[in-house]
């Protein structure tokens, strides 16, 4: 669901309409800490932008207004992909974004965002909170003067919208698909042609046939985008983003300046928002899926086994290469991989086995 | 994982050793609100008791000590299954328990605990927070002067420990199994004999052959109990408890007496603890499973298809009968069922389809 291009392509006009300050004036007036939260999403963008609003509102309420937080949409204060740097240097005290955008800062950031054929959302949270993942994330971001938190999860995404059928591995050859990041690299090795397009170009590119396919997120976000009008094949599963984590990042100095109670409030609010976004995605995707299928006659199709097996093998290869780039990336890779292997053994006989039983 | 008998069988001596007040004296001294949290678990009981401690600690920290909470294990202040009544009448301001214990108060409580062949933990949270579930829960508990919150989830449990193999539906005939509640009723209709035994009797009953099988929770809690010493067949999936919700309940008057900021703190702390317990269960079960299999040579086996299909059919029947008992139970049943059907269609092509792809 990498939205880099999409967000870049949004004009200032589109954003201005959604510009509502979250902090009421009364609250801001007595605030001991007046914070800015910059985000990589358009203001009030469904799920992502609204989760940032929810987070800000909860911190304000819990602190009795001692912290006021004004939420800024992408480009309102800084461009969407300068959130990391801007919070790092203190232009804003807080940011709401995704770690997979910061590969240019450090390769290891990708493990805290989305890993093709990696852990599910539920497994990722277990790794972060009880498997050492959060400590590694903190160690990594500390170098950038940031305190990271896991704030939101998409759950398993969809594989994307395709103009033609994918019946076998052969159908990936030459496939022009908009799929960025590690997933794009995997597609390339499978013979496809990953294309980078801004979100604003996606719809018309798919309509004209300039691209054969595009991934996005899941039914709720995809329905709003209207992809069903130009492609009827909606493929699953989202092998490239099986449980992507979003992040709220806090400037380390701003965090250190808070008394203990307000530090606890900020951390707990992020953990609650993490739970909230996953629940929202599950609830809203299921309703949107009904609409896509029953109202818009979208064909929901599964990628064939040979395609999935090949993409899985290539994903392991691509992710392992991230570990080869530097010692810290290797350390995170090893923690992630070791936990993932154990977690999947438990998932196989618990969550997965239950879902199989229910489907019999 | 109904622990009624287990907890009843625990002596005062066993509990006394674990009696540590969570609130430091310094915090309690300046507290504006000195609360008691009574629980249905032995003090510091892994995951359940420690989640109650985590919740109390977070509320204290976030409130800067304005709320102090002393956590009581089962039987320290009231017996484990008087938590609901005691919080309702204000003996304690808060309780940590499970809604499935309160069937005697109202049949509908069962939908907020565990439903055989019901929703997964992730689906349940979507229903509660974004599908109207929480509002129904609040409506139900309001009659009892209580504010409910979802505070913890076990994730999918195990089917239990069996002394003999279950190769077909015929093997359930006459099977003496400790399995309480709706799951027990389902087993009975499949020809088995559900037995109610206190937790303290479980180990010796299984050892002597007085019972053929028992369910409990999952690897982490089961390992501590030592069932692997007297039964080597560890069956999955936990069809009777696919994602059980735990609860923190608050006395309505005590909650109303809090200023807005402290109310927000209590609610958000519960939501964060809800996320935390699921993560802890996933992380610790996977490690314990390794120990059971590799160190204790436990045989992990899957219930056969015909058994699962039959139990599923009977579960739908048994759960539907709960709806027949009164109008409010029907209202909750209809909300739960309608959401569950939609949610499972999304789960099938997201979470479930991804886990299938990963397993290819």
Image: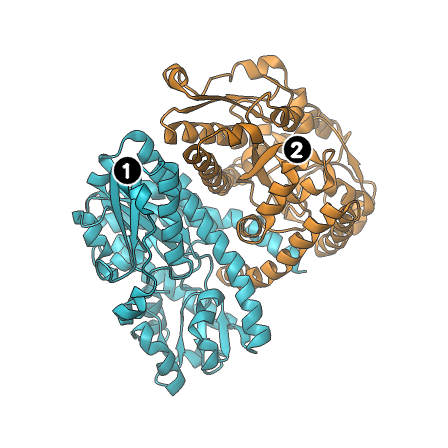
Chain colours: A cyan, B orange
- Horizontal and vertical percent for residue A97? 31, 55
Q: Residue at x 75, y 40 (%)?
A: B184
Which residue does the numbered mark 1 point to in the structure image? A30
Residue B122 image point, x, y percent: 53, 50
Q: Position of residue B40 (x, y in %)?
A: 61, 27
Residue B32's disc number = none
Give the alpha-carbon distance from disc 2 to disc 1, as whole Å: 38 Å
Q: In the image, what residue occupies the spot 53% across and 57% down?
A: A283
Query: Quadrant of residue A255 in the image?
Result: top left
**Of marks 2 and 1, the one in the foreground:** 1
Q: What subunit carries mark 2?
A: B
Q: Is residue B262 left or right of residue B152?
A: left
Q: Quadrant of the N terminus of chain B?
A: top right
SS assignment at label 1:
helix
- Residue at mark 2: B144
Q: Residues within 10 Å of mark 1 (few under 14, many from 20)?
A: some
Look at the picture and state if A99 lies above or below A226: above
- Is A160 left or right of B156, judged from the image as shown? left
In this view, the residue in front, A155 or A251, is A251
Look at 24% across and 62% down and name the residue there. A75
Determine which quarter of the picture holds residue A18: bottom left
Up/down of A62 relative to B4, above or below: below
Q: Is residue A32 left or right of residue B232?
A: left
């Amino acid at each position: 669901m990498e939205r880099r291009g999409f967000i870049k392509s949004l004009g200032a006009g589109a954003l201005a309409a959604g510009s509502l300050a979250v902090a009421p004036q009364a609250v801001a007036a007595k605030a001991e800490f007046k914070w800015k939260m910059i985000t990589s999403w358009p203001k009030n963008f469904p799920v992502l932008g609204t989760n940032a609003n929810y987070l800000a509102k909860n911190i304000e309420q819990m602190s009795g207004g001692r912290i006021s937080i004004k939420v800024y949409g992408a480009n309102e204060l800084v461009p969407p992909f300068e959130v990391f740097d801007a919070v790092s240097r203190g232009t804003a005290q807080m940011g709401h974004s995704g770690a997979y955008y910061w590969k240019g800062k450090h390769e290891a950031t990708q493990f805290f965002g989305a890993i093709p054929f990696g852990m599910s959302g539920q497994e990722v949270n277990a790794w972060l909170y009880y498997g050492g993942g959060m400590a590694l994330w903190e160690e990594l971001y500390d170098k950038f003067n940031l305190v990271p938190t896991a704030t939101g999860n998409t759950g398993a995404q969809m594989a994307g919208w395709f103009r033609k059928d994918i019946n076998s591995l052969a159908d990936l050859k030459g496939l022009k698909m908009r799929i960025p990041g590690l997933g794009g690299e995997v597609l390339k090795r499978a013979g496809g042609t990953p294309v980078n397009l801004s979100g604003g170009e996606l719809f018309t590119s798919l309509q004209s046939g300039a691209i054969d396919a595009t991934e996005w997120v899941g039914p709720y976000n995809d329905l709003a985008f209207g992809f069903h009008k130009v492609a009827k094949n909606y493929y699953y599963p989202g092998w490239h983003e099986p449980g992507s984590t979003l992040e709220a990042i806090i400037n380390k100095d701003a965090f250190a300046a808070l008394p203990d109670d307000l530090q606890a409030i900020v951390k707990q609010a992020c953990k609650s928002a993490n739970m909230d976004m996953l629940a929202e995605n599950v609830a809203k995707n299921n309703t949107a899926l009904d609409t896509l299928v029953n109202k818009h006659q979208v064909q929901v199709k599964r990628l064939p086994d040979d395609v999935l097996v090949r993409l899985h093998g290539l994903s392991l290869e691509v992710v392992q290469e991230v570990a080869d780039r530097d010692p810290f990336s290797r350390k995170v890779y090893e923690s992630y991989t070791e936990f993932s292997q154990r977690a999947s053994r438990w998932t196989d006989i618990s969550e997965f086995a239950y879902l199989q039983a229910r489907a019999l």
